[in-house]
Image: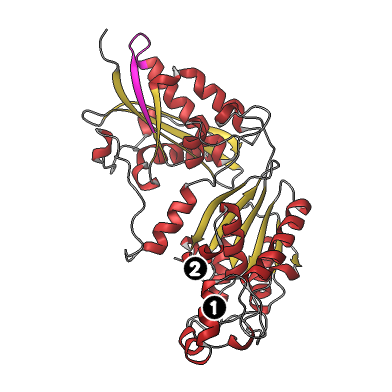
Amino acid sequence: MSAPRQLVVEADGGSRGNPGPAGYGAVVLDPADSATLAEAAEYIGVATNNVAEYKGLIAGLKAVRELFPDTPVQVRVRMDSKLVVEQMSGRWKIKHPDMKPLAEEAARVLPASSVTYEWIPRAENKHADRLANEAMDAGKRGGQWEPASSTADLETTRASVLSEPPPPAGPPGDAAAGAARVRAAMAAARPAPQAAPAATGQVGWGAPDLGAPATFILLRHGETALTPEKRFSGSGGSDPELSATGRHQAACAAEAFAARGTVQEIVSSPLRRCRETAQAVADRLGLEVHVEEGLRETDFGVWEGLTFAEVRERHGADLTAWLASPDAAPAGGESFAEVAERVTVTRDRLIARYKGRTVLLVTHVTPIKTLVRLALGAPPEALFRMELSAASVSTVAYYADGNPSLRLLNDTSHLR
């Protein structure tokens, strides 16, 4: 028997509004010389990004089947959708009712043994991305995509990964200059460990549907005058307002959330810097801000307003104890264990209140890190191993079976 024909499928989908006017694009490539063997694109009306991405995958696989109906093939699918790649690989469960039939359809196009999936950065998926945008542009004009008018393969560079799959690689060392950005990217690309459902033990697209999760978008407040000086600023000292930089950051966040169109509720810490940040978003989205006491920052007691160096000089023994144990607290302040207890209670209350909804929580460094740590099942010392910039965005989803999934950490792309 002859060896199977090696092929690459690149696919993408997009939605201008999520949900909004949507389209997909897919291309079949010969990995030997990067030649384009087939293109597909279509405007699909109003849909979400994920639906459009799945539609692109299905179109790409069907294009392979039409090109080589009687030839054994081995297809490497490359997409910048982590969700589609992980679900089709069987590593993530499918919980949204719109996704399951699409995943099942994609799985039926070609034998499972002949298809592998690989996540790639968006910058490496330009061909399919441009096809998807051409389809959406055509839909905006009231028509459909035509191959003759496509320019999707122009200005598209083919990396050597088309010929050889990338080798497995461990996480880069924290000594790298961009370590914080690397950690954020890794967090966004990797799901938290999840227990298999007790009834079936299934994972992947065959797993039971758990419905839409409660999704918490965690926005750290914008800068205050204390932020660039790296001073302890909790809930026990002054209650600073946003600086001019902080107000600009809040405005940038508001525009980003308006463009995405996914935030349904806004909940804020009672502290001024968070309420101001939340109000900027609320004004842009036309929503109300609900204040939640449990989202306030740690009370740093006598350390409030001091830099780390000043605390080391004045309260060295207390600082050493604080760094060594989550049960240690600054004089007159809270321990991280106490903060974790109130954040946990607050989290559970909000999950019950906002089941199946997407909620923006505007809060502080410690509550956000605590929610992330708890989602990952990480030890308390993990708090010291995360970077959270002012006005950064992190996301955790909470499913009906009690399993959380960390989706994003310390994203500041909206500020650039």
Q: Amino acid at mark 1?
A: Ala
Q: Residue at x 62, y 59 (%)?
A: 371
- Disc 2 to disc 1, C-alpha distance: 14 Å
Residue under label 2, please give it: 384
The quadrant of the image that shows the N terminus is: top left
Considering depth in this image, is 376 or 150 the residue closer to the camera? 376
* Residue 71 located within the stretch drawn in magenta: yes
Residue under label 1, please give it: 321
Relative image position of residue 20 (x, y in whole percent):
60, 43
Residue farthest to the bottom, as pictured: 314
What range is drawn magenta here? 67-77
Relative image position of residue 262 (x, y in whole percent):
63, 51
Q: Residue at x 70, y 60 (%)?
A: 344
* Residue 75 in sight in this render: yes
- Quadrant in the picture for residue 394: bottom right
Q: Is residue 320 above or below residue 104?
A: below
Element type at marker 2? helix
Element type at marker 1? helix
- Quadrant in the picture for residue 343: bottom right
Q: Amino acid at mark 2?
A: Phe
Q: Is residue 30 above or below residue 192?
A: above
Relative image position of residue 253 (x, y in whole percent):
56, 65
The quadrant of the image that shows the C terminus is: bottom left
Considering depth in this image, is 318 or 72 the residue closer to the camera? 318
Q: Is residue 99 above or below residue 294?
A: above
Q: Residue at x 40, y 46 (%)?
A: 122
